[in-house]
Amino acid sequence: MSDTGKDESDIKRTVAGSYDQPTVRFPNYDVSRREGSSHAGSSHDVSTHEGRSIPRTDEDFDPDPTQHLGVVQRTGSRHGESVDSTPSIAEAPTYSYASIPPAPEVKRESVVSPPVELRPRRGTLDLGLLILRVAIGGTFVFHGLQKLTGIANGPGMDGVRDMLANSGWKYPDLAAIMLTVGELAGGTMLILGVATPLAAGALLAVIIDAWLVRQAAQPGWQYSGPNGTEYEAMLVAAAAALTLTGPGRYAVDGRRGWATRPRYGSMIALVAAIAAAICTWIFLHGGSPFS
């Protein structure tokens, strides 16, 4: 009985320890000494090391995050030597599916006109248009000055007004002003090559009405003969052609696209000129120009 009691008291003293109390602090753990020690023999007793305390925050675990961007080292298994375990970022393998290809280059059309040497050759086309513009525009300017000032045996404004009144125009004064301004302004702009579709269109409207006056002077088709309409018909064709072709390069607007490559705008100017001539005849002269 005494032996049994003695054994139980010895067991109780053996089991009891300082770590049974909840307020006991754990001993510090020296990481550097543990890494520098030899691995031969039995495992180390944590309670015998002193030094750095057990990490409690993120900074304690990884105080310098940038050290992982280079080479990651680990301790050698035998002599505690540092051994490179992972390659650097520059040597890290790349994968095609993980890379993003560059965006394709988008070529935008240039709005600048090509150099002169790269433009198509036009030969003597621009020179021919210049001669035609000067000839037709000069003719209209001459007739406009005759009506305005009476030079070269011109009728003057009074004579133009009387002529229009005798031809059946209801508003000869307004018609005389429109006729004179149209010939002078349109002819000057055509010679210079300024807004050629509009200038040639204005001259076209003027000469169409002049052709209608000459045609209505006598019954029947009047083209040839002393009182024929050959002269007016040639001017109508020339003004219509310049409305469609443009002035060419030898003009004030020679660098514009429509000056050498006219398209829909010139056709619209031609139709507008014909419509203006018809409306002027209907409202200022009276009657239908087709009868």
Image: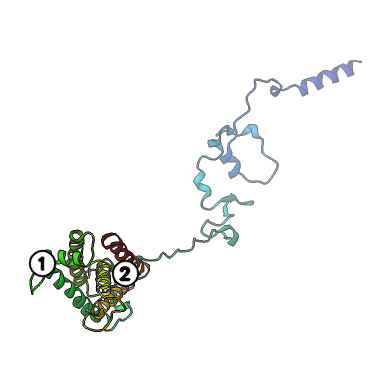
Measured as percent of width and height from the top left, residue 143 is found at 15, 72
Dot 1 lies on which element?
helix
Does the rendering let one see residue 16?
A: yes
Quadrant where the N terminus sits is: top right
Identify the residue at image location x=67%, y=46%.
Answer: 40
Corner quadrant of residue 158: bottom left
Of residues 185 and 122, the one nearer the viewer is 185
Residue denoted by label 2:
258
Left or right relative to 217: residue 55: right
Q: Quadrant of the C terminus?
A: bottom left
- The residue labelled by disc 1 is 156
Residue 258 percent coordinates (x, y): 31, 69
Numbered disc in front, either 2 or 1: 1
Rendered location of residue 97, percent (x, y):
60, 60
Mark closer to the chain start, 2 or 1 = 1
Dot label at residue 29: none
Say which quarter of the image contains residue 121.
bottom left
Compare residues 8 and 246 and report the one nearer the observer. Answer: 246
Circle 2: residue type: Trp
Q: Answer with the quarter of the image where residue 129 lies.
A: bottom left
Q: How many marks?
A: 2
Label 2 element class: helix
Outermost front residue: 219
Q: Is residue 129 above or below residue 73?
A: below
Is 233 drawn above or below residue 28 in the view shown?
A: below
Residue type at numbered disc 1: Gly
Q: Residue at x 8, y 67 (%)?
A: 149
248 lies left or right of 21: left
> Given contact means CB atoms under 8 Å apart, are the residues at marks 2 and 1 in contact?
no
Measuring from the top left, give residue 239's x and y in whole percent: 27, 74
State whether residue 47 is above or below residue 225.
Answer: above
Residue drawn at (65%, 20%), measured in percent from left and top? Answer: 23
